[in-house]
Amino acid sequence: MPDTFIKIASVTVGSGGASSIDFTSIPSTYTDLCVKLSIRNTSTESTNQIYVQPNSATTNLSSRILVGTGSATASASYTSDSSIWGYCCGNGSTSNTFGNSEFYFPNYAGSTNKSISVDSVNETNATDARQSLLAGLWSSTTAISSLKFLTIENSTGNSKNFVQYSTATLYGIKNS
Amino acid sequence: MADKKIVVDCSTGEVSEIELTAEEVAQREADAKAHAEAKSAEDAEKAAKAADKAALLEKLGISEDEAKLLLG
């Protein structure tokens, strides 16, 4: 039985932290891409965001998102977005917890617009712990060859760094 | 300590930690601002429309369900 879920690259953030995690020169030989992340950032708050720019794009992006906070639910749609995102932990979260997320890019190397799906959660022992499901679209016919992940503080929008031991693993998926 | 980005070259497997240039620092801040503002602008627009709708219903003295009946 052939392998269909293949690790392309993996990275663990070192002691100095990192402002972004960039996967570059992604081969076009797979059907889909999947990135699994375990992330905590330097914000003193618990609720934070991780976002991705395909090919460093910040335009022609749109999304619909469902969010659960632990006590409430919400949904939103963004027709003129600048990134595709999910939730992650910050240093305000319970000690040693990391948020989990998966970013999935079907048909990433094709010549049609690129759909992107994201599921994420910021782990913390508090009444407000966020989970989200996002359906995104990058309206571009260009094949995705790079993915840049960045992180911000949810309440302020200020950029933050990934802390040590945050991880990101890029997988290629083949349909045969 | 200067901010560093981690770059993974998937064609070689090489992982590099590279200090951000001044231009990259500025771009990162601009990207973060754009990311946050894109959402707050659309959220604000939706909130304003919802407020306008609620004010109109109150002015007319009818509920949302009653407005739907009128328009249906």
Image (tube, helix red, strand yellow):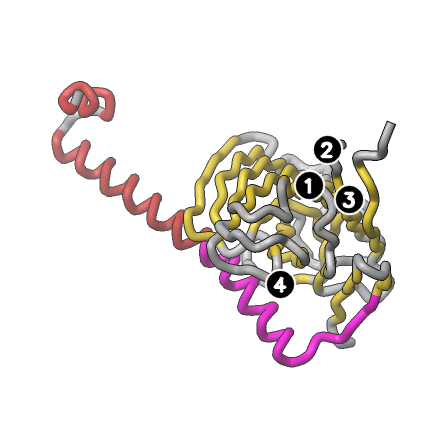
The numbered disc on residue A171 is 3
Of badges 1 and 4, the one in the foreground is 1
Q: Report which residue position mark 4 lands on.
A: A159
Q: Which of B67 and B57 is in front in this view?
A: B67
On what subunit does the disc labeled 2 rest? A
Q: Residue at x 55, y 45 (%)?
A: A114
The numbered disc on residue A32 is 1
Q: At numbered mark 2, what does the secondary structure look like: helix, strand or loop?
A: loop
Give the vertical position of A165 relative to B68 (above or below).
below
Q: Can residue A129 be seen in this view?
A: no
Q: Give the range drawn in magenta.
A: B16-38
Of badges 3 and 1, the one in the foreground is 1
Of badges 3 and 2, the one in the foreground is 2
The amino acid beneath tag 1 is: Asp
- Mark 4 near mark 2, Cβ–Cβ under 8 Å? no
Residue A116 screen position, x and y as percent: 59, 42
The numbered disc on residue A175 is 2
Toward which corner of the image does residue A6 lie, by quadrant? top right
Sequence-first disc among 1 and 2: 1
Residue A70 screen position, x and y as percent: 61, 31
Q: Is B18 placed left or right of B40 in the picture?
A: right
The amino acid beneath tag 4 is: Ser
On what subunit does the disc labeled 1 rest? A
Of badges 1 and 2, the one in the foreground is 2
Q: Is residue A165 visible?
A: yes
Of badges 3 and 4, the one in the foreground is 3
